[in-house]
Amino acid sequence: MKTLWQHCHVATMAGGKYSIIEDAAMVTAGSLIEWVGPRSQVPPANYAQAHDLQGAWVTPGLIDCHTHTVFGGNRSGEFEQRLEGVSYAEIAAQGGGIASTVRATRAATEDELFASAHKRLRSLLRDGVTTVEIKSGYGLDLASERKLLRVIRRLGEALPVSVCATCLAAHALPPEYKDRADDYIDHICSEMLPALAAEGLVDAVDAFCEYLAFSPEQVERVFKVAQQLGLPVKLHAEQLSALHGSSLAARYHALSADHLEFMTEEDAIAMAASGTVAVLLPGAFYFLRETQLPPMEALRKHGVKIAIASDLNPGTSPALSVRLMLNMACTLFRMTPEEALAGATQHAATALGMGDTHGSLEVGKVADFVAWQIDRPADLAYWLGGELDKRVVRHGVDVTV
Ligand code: DI6
Ligand code: FE
């Protein structure tokens, strides 16, 4: 069934550029894009449906390639503590931080976790998101990580969004393994990952490489097992200190290395060589009142692809809007609105291993797009949140929420 979408302008984001077509039209056939170009050249055909987009700007559906959407509880109390001067690391050392969310997550039922995550995910969808990555990592034992990954799969079935599930069992040390980090890594490698992968619950494997989490050596053991299981890897790296996790990620051809405030130019060179995407998370930078900027110049100089994501999580980025992240990427990291939008479309797709099928409006790609009632594409990075009038199309079907 062919559908015509017309009276619009298109920012295709092909190659990570706006690649604008004014007075454009698009033809979808089922869930795919069959044609896109100037309206004057629409191929004649018997269209089952023709939609008037009323002068909208059409972009690819937004892709949030790094979130921790599923968790129990909430940490606004810690937010207050931090504003009184207690640091994120101090709160973590006192048993707060990730550990407090782990307690709340373990205590919650699968249905409770589903219900709270569903609300958060709906906020992202109302903002034009059609693909999202969601990590586990607040369970930290086999049963609880399985519970989170099941909720992640259920969210993808319940809502009109493509969901990539990432196992982040190596997020923090669970209390039962206190002072035995290597034993926990053994457990992840020999029990958790093989079991969860066999159950089809895992699309990729992530870890937190940081002085208050896991060392590069420990991360490498996790990566080796992921590789044996045929799963792509990605890494939280260089968020609080420079351990060169991003270079390690590059050696394992990671899809992405994420955060990266403390990365060096050598790390950027390694990432460029392996095609590992730099996922920058301005919400966490902002919320932690970080002052160390990611090395934008080195990333650009060496041609590392840059994605932007929400990092939606209860501790460091309670962010419910990708468009707000685009604004922050511009104001805080000095990205252009075009770079920021590429970061939440084409480069975010590449960061999820979906760059060939998603992230731009090109013939043969999946018909996931948003028709925004805005004046210019830069408006997407301009407004500070709020709701914009729009239609959201996923797999060629209008799914506006
Ligand atoms: N880095 C982060 O910013 C989140 N996880 C991570 O590895 C924080 C998670 C939290 O504080 O709950
Ligand atoms: Fe994160």
Image (cartoon, rainbow, N blue to C red):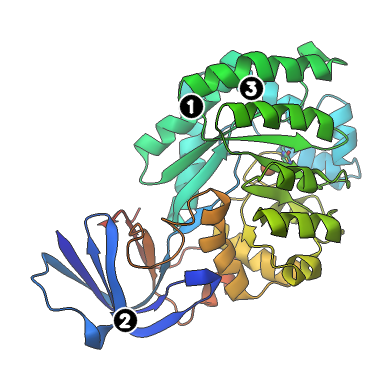
Residue plotted at (47% across, 71% down)? 14
Residues at marks 2 and 3, CA–CA distance in whole angstroms: 47 Å
103 relative to 28, above or below:
above
Which residue is farthest top?
176
Query: Measuring 23% from the left and 88% from the top, which residue is drawn there?
Result: 40
Between 386 and 243, the residue placed more toward the observer is 243
Residue 1 percent location from the top left of the image: 14, 58
Q: Nearer the viewer, residue 287 or 296?
A: 296
Left or right? Give the position of 228 relative to 29: right
Does residue 281 appear left or right of residue 25 in this picture? Answer: right
Amino acid marked by disc 2: Ala
Residue found at the far bottom of this picture: 40
Q: Residue at label 1?
A: 201
Q: Is mark 2 within 8 Å of ligand 2?
A: no
* Marked residue nearer the N-terminal end (3 or 1): 3
Numbered label attached to residue 139: 3
Instruction: Determine whether the residue tagged by mark 2 lies in a helix, strand or loop.
Output: strand
Judged by depth in the image, the label closer to the viewer, 3 or 1, is 1
- Answer few, some or many: residues within 10 Å of disc 3's Cα (few below 14, many 20 plus, some between 14 and 19): many
Whether residue 124 can be seen here: yes
User: Residue 61 in the image: x percent, y percent?
Assistant: 43, 60
Quadrant hosting residue 252 = top right
Q: Looking at the image, tell me whether mark 1 or mark 2 is earlier in sequence order.
A: 2
Is the shortest distance between ligand 1 and the CB of mark 3 under 8 Å?
Answer: no
* Residue 321 is at least partly visible in this image: no
List x then y, in percent, for residue 367.
33, 59
Q: Residue at x 35, y 53 (%)?
A: 401
Q: What residue would you read off at disc 2?
A: 24
Identify the amino acid type marked 3.
Answer: Gly
Marks 2 and 3, the one that precedes in the sequence = 2
Q: Closer to the observer: label 2 or label 3?
A: 2
